[in-house]
Image (cartoon, rainbow, N blue to C red):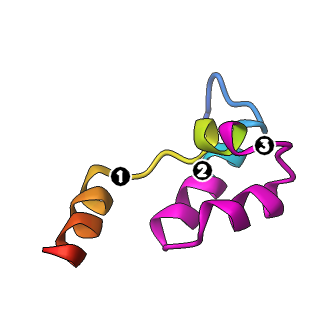
Amino acid sequence: MQVKITSFHWHDTRHDFASKMVIKGVPLKTVREICGHPDLNTTLRYAHSAPDHKADAIALIG
């Protein structure tokens, strides 16, 4: 079976990679270093975390 993927860019995998690290609890500074981003703002654009991940973080202090 052959799957046709449209609008794929290798660059998109960087977003997925950074997001998965953040969701697994890797500190943003470490994600920044691994990805080679010059500053934290770049990392924040790449690292999209899932909404339930945010709720879990809040639950840690509640």
Element type at marker 2? helix
Q: Which residue is under mark 1?
A: 50
Query: Residue 7 occupies which quadrant of the picture?
Result: top right
The stretch of residues the image draws in magenta is: 17-41
**In this rendering, the label closer to the viewer, 3 or 1:** 3
- Is 26 covered by the magenta stretch? yes
Number of numbered callouts drawn: 3
Q: Position of residue 37 (x, y in %)?
A: 82, 46
**Residue drawn at 87 percent across, 52 percent down:** 36
Whether label 3 touches label 1, CB < 8 Å: no
Q: Position of residue 31 (x, y in %)?
A: 70, 61
**Residue drawn at 35 percent across, 52 percent down:** 50
**Which residue type does callout 3 highlight?**
Asp
Q: Which residue is under mark 2?
A: 16
Q: Which residue is under mark 3?
A: 39
Whether label 1 touches label 2, CB < 8 Å: no
Q: Nearer the viewer, residue 14 or 62?
A: 62
- Is 20 covered by the magenta stretch? yes
Give the mark nearer the N terminus: 1 vs 2.
2
Element type at marker 3? loop
Element type at marker 1? loop
How far is disc 1 from disc 2 in space, using C-alphas? 12 Å
Q: Position of residue 3 (x, y in %)?
A: 59, 40
**In this rendering, the label closer to the viewer, 1 or 2:** 1
**Which residue type does callout 2 highlight?**
Asp
Q: Are there few (<14), some (14-19), or many (20+) residues within 10 Å of tag 1?
A: few
Q: Position of residue 44 (x, y in %)?
A: 59, 42
**Residue drawn at 62 percent across, 24 percent down:** 6
**Which residue type does callout 1 highlight?**
Ala
